[in-house]
Image (cartoon, rainbow, N blue to C red):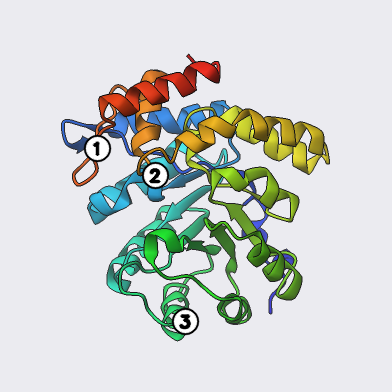
């Protein structure tokens, strides 16, 4: 096993790294608006940005669109914070194209989702990830979200990848399972990087050893999430708990419908995007959901 201190590229991978939405305009990706969202994140204290995560609706994007967003993010950030590129798909060939582009574009890390729909065995997952890790030394992480992909990774799979891939550094863990985090940190490597992928677990998972957040709600108010992470780093758990509690209803609202339907509507209401446009089969929030989300934003003091 290669200890994390021998992975200097991974040192900056920590903190609040929100998965940015993809703004659309008349059916096309609005790249100018995307640049504005990247700048908004940096201006408001985010410790990095995640491109093409679930919140970006990547399955509705072409490979060229996903690649262009990665290049645009890297160029816009220009070294001011890490850029994590989500390069996974259900297809090895597609994931290789996305991964090669992200590496060549200068992404600081890769986030690779467990292949969805096909429900591969653990030995297939291991070989899949090792194949995608070949030929580069960019730090990479598993995106562990079995609720979307219908397959999870086991403790033994994480251990095998840690032992066999020098640039495997951790996971985005979008599962309501704090025990898995503790087992990985306690039985595999305490330096594994865990990023919280479920808003409701932001503070609890950081308290048991996560190094940061990759939460959709960071699209709305990045500063609060950055402040909460930094409170934990400073051992100010009282402040961290208070900030987590202040986000409770907004965190819940993210899942009033399929992500990012609520997020995009709330961003529109906050003036962060011009319209909450989606690509089919995703679709905008209906009027009853709009009213419900307006009430959440009002109670949170955001509008």
Circle 2 residues within 10 Å: few <14, some 14–19, many ≥20: many
How many marks do you count on the picture? 3
Image quadrant where residue 124 sits: bottom left
Q: Position of residue 153 (x, y in %)?
A: 51, 73
Circle 3 residues within 10 Å: few <14, some 14–19, many ≥20: some
Inter-mark Cα distance, 3 to 1: 34 Å
Image quadrant where residue 162 sits: bottom right
- Screen quadrant of the N terminus: bottom right
**Residue 51 in the figure: left or right of residue 190:** left
Of residues 10 and 184, the one drawn nearer to the viewer in this rendering: 184
Which is nearer the N-term, disc 3 or disc 1?
Answer: 3
Q: Position of residue 286 (x, y in %)?
A: 26, 29
Inter-mark Cα distance, 1 to 2: 11 Å
User: Going 16% across and 31% down the picture, which residue do you hit?
Assistant: 26
- Residue highlighted by disc 2: 55
- Residue highlighted by disc 1: 278
User: Going 60% across and 53% down the picture, which residue do you hit?
Assistant: 195
Residue 217 visible in the shown view = yes
Q: Position of residue 71 (x, y in %)?
A: 37, 47
Q: Position of residue 240 (x, y in %)?
A: 74, 36
Disc 2 element: helix
User: Going 28% across and 72% down the picture, which residue do you hit?
Assistant: 93
- Residue highlighted by disc 3: 122
**Residue 108 in the figure: left or right of residue 58:** right
């Amino acid at each position: 096993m290669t200890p994390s201190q021998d992975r200097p590229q991974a040192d900056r991978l920590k903190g609040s790294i929100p998965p940015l939405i993809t703004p659309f305009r008349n059916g096309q990706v609005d790249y100018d608006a995307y640049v504005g969202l990247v700048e908004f994140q940096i201006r408001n204290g985010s410790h990095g940005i995640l491109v093409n995560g679930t919140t970006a609706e990547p399955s509705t994007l072409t490979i060229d669109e996903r690649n262009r967003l990665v290049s645009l993010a890297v160029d816009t950030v220009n070294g001011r914070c890490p850029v994590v590129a989500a390069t996974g798909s259900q297809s090895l060939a597609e994931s290789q194209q996305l991964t090669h582009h992200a590496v060549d574009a200068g992404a600081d890390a890769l986030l690779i989702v467990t292949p969805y729909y096909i429900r591969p065995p653990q030995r297939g997952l291991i070989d899949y990830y090792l194949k995608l890790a070949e030929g580069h030394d960019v730090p990479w992480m598993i995106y562990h979200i079995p609720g979307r992909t219908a397959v999870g990774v086991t403790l033994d799979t994480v251990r095998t990848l840690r032992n066999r891939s020098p640039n495997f550094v951790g996971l985005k863990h979008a599962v309501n399972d704090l025990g898995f985090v503790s087992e990985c940190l306690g039985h595999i490597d305490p330096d594994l990087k865990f990023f919280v992928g479920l808003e409701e677990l932001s503070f609890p998972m950081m308290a048991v050893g996560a190094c940061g957040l990759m939460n959709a709600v960071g699209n709305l108010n990045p500063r609060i999430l950055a402040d909460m992470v930094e409170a934990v780093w400073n051992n100010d758990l009282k402040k961290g708990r208070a900030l987590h509690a202040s986000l409770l209803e907004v965190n819940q609202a993210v899942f009033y419908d399929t992500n990012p339907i609520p997020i995009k509507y709330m961003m529109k209401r906050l003036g962060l995007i011009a319209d909450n446009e989606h690509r089919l089969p995703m679709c905008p929030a209906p009027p009853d959901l709009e009213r419900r989300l307006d009430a959440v934003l009002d109670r949170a003091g955001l509008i």
